Amino acid sequence: MPFRNHIVWVTGASSGIGEAICRAFAQQGARVVLSARRGKELERIRRTLPSPNDHLVYTMDLSRRLNWEEAATIVQAQCGPIDIFVHSCGRSQRSSAHETTMDVDRQLMELNYFSAVGLTKALLPSMIQRGRGHLVPISSVSGRVSPPFRSAYAASKHALHGFFDAIRAENHHNGIKVTIICPGYVRTHLSENAATHTLEPYGQMDATTARGISPERCAQRVLKGIARCEEEVLVGGRETWAVYLKCLAPRLLSRIIRRGNRP
Ligand SMILES: NC(=O)c1ccc[n+]([C@@H]2O[C@H](COP(=O)([O-])OP(=O)(O)OC[C@H]3O[C@@H](n4cnc5c(N)ncnc54)[C@H](OP(=O)(O)O)[C@@H]3O)[C@@H](O)[C@H]2O)c1
């Protein structure tokens, strides 16, 4: 069990991929801090984890500009220094760029990108001081390839790669690892919760999401990638091939990707 007694902070822990990652770490003997907005849901999940008293709930709304240092200080005062930080909170989008209000662009950037930046900057000094720490942003295949009707979402996920690739290069000698996760379709509430052009929830399960891999399978691959210190993990079905196609045959990918249905 490579993660026994590791302290792991997971955002987006109340649902989907984040929840499955919490369960997978807890099964391996890690101590987990669960964060999201819905405290009751986090508590329910905590109580069903192995050794529930080893884990902690810390509720936060990451679409707001928070005092990231204060959040990191409170969490670490309660559970000790964070070994692994998994940033799984996120919201997708189903709307064309020209109809989408700037509010949507800003909100998705705040939640999907700036919250990862804020919490990472707050955690890095203590990780550098200890000479160890592992950062695990959950990006997406859309962080590598932009599908139609996901302009704000894809931009926020691409930004994660720019930031975390630099963090990896800067902190290699400090003992900090970065594993960026790029899921394809995973069967979660992502499409139902996605923002439309006015931030209203889309409210529908996409057929592609419904056919996706289970969050549990995704979580197993995430833990394997972390244990092996992989730099980037592609996980999902054939849709992940788009990342290779972008390098090998970009015009062919463009022809395929523009067939994407209007939501
Ligand atoms: N499912 C897929 O096919 C897929 C594919 C590629 C990438 N991803 C990425 O995987 C990550 C997890 O998504 P999921 O598929 O598990 O979707 P999900 O089931 O909708 O989970 C989203 C999580 O984010 C949290 N969250 C949303 N808004 C928040 C806010 N304002 N403050 C704090 N937490 C917030 C939610 O908790 P609360 O509502 O309790 O706050 C929930 O725990 C996301 O970053 C997503 O972009 C998913």
Image: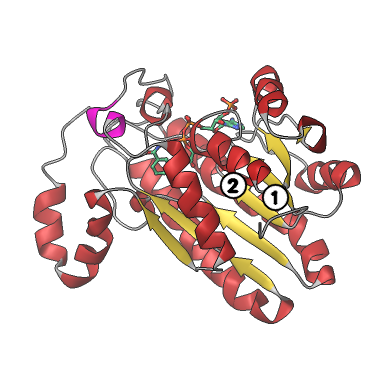
Q: Is mark 2 within 8 Å of ligand 1?
A: yes
Q: Position of residue 7 (x, y in %)?
A: 76, 51
User: Mark 1 or mark 2, which is nearer to you?
Assistant: 2
The residue type indicated by label 2 comes to His
Q: Is residue 90 magenta?
A: no
Seen from the viewer's position, the closer of residues 227 and 74 is 227
Residue 217 relative to residue 83: left or right: left
Q: Position of residue 45 (x, y in %)?
A: 65, 26
Where is residue 185, by image quadrant? top left
Q: Can residue 119 be seen?
A: yes
Where is residue 210, by image quadrant? top left
Label 1 or label 2, whichever comes before in sequence order: 2
Residue 148 relative to residue 29: left or right: left
What range of the chain is rendered magenta?
Answer: 206-210
The residue type indicated by label 1 comes to Leu
Mark 1 closeness class: few <14, some 14–19, many ≥20 residues within 10 Å: many
> Residue under circle 1?
119
**Would you say the residues marked 1 and 2 are in contact, meaning their CB atoms lie under 8 Å apart?**
yes
> Residue under circle 2?
87
C-alpha distance separating marks 1 and 2: 9 Å
- Kindly report the secondary structure that dominates the magenta region of the rendered protein: helix
Residue 8 relative to residue 53: left or right: left
Secondary element under disc 1, as helix, strand or loop, is helix
Residue 131 relative to residue 42: left or right: right
Q: Position of residue 105 (x, y in %)?
A: 44, 38
